[in-house]
Amino acid sequence: MSKKPADPGTELIESIRTGLPGGVELNEREQALLDLAARQARDVAAAEADIESRGYLVPGSRGQQVVNPSVAEVRQGRLTLGKLLGPRPTRVHEGCRQERQARR
């Protein structure tokens, strides 16, 4: 029996959630961004699979060799993932905020 390949979106979500410090939960906005990133990761994986199966160059409309359109999709998808998962303003715990103000 062959094991089903892992879903890239599910792997992404699990990796991020297990990397969170204890007691930290995602808010609704962060969860929505994570869900979008998971969908994007699945799209990138599908485009990468297309490149793997058909190759970097594919036949064009007139039989000429052209770059597989999935190459551009993968590049754009990776940029989008970077934007979705890039640095975000962090939430400051109220106790930390009060401590910082007390030091001033």
Image (spheres, rainbow, N blue to C red):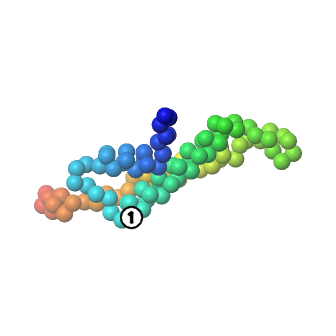
Where, by quadrant of the figure, is residue 102 drawn?
Answer: bottom left
Q: Position of residue 11 (x, y in %)?
A: 42, 45
Q: In terms of depth relative to the viewer, which is nearer, 4 or 48?
A: 4
Residue visible at 69% across and 36% down?
55
Left or right, 47 with respect to 65, comes to left
Residue visible at 61% across and 45% down?
47
Query: Label 1 neighbourhood size at 10 Å, few (<14), some (14-19), many (20+)?
Result: few
Residue visible at 56% across and 47% down?
44
Q: In terms of depth relative to the viewer, which is nearer, 39 or 33?
A: 39
User: Which residue of the protein is positioned furthest toward the left in this rendering?
Assistant: 102
The residue wearing badge 1 is 29
Left or right, 69 with respect to 13, comes to right
User: Which residue of the protein is positioned furthest toward the top in this rendering?
Assistant: 1
Q: Position of residue 31 (x, y in %)?
A: 38, 60
Left or right, 8 with respect to 21, comes to right
Residue 16 shows in the view: yes
Residue 82 shows in the view: no
User: Which residue of the protein is positioned furthest toward the bottom in this rendering?
Assistant: 28
Residue visible at 66% across and 37% down?
53
Q: Position of residue 68 (x, y in %)?
A: 71, 43
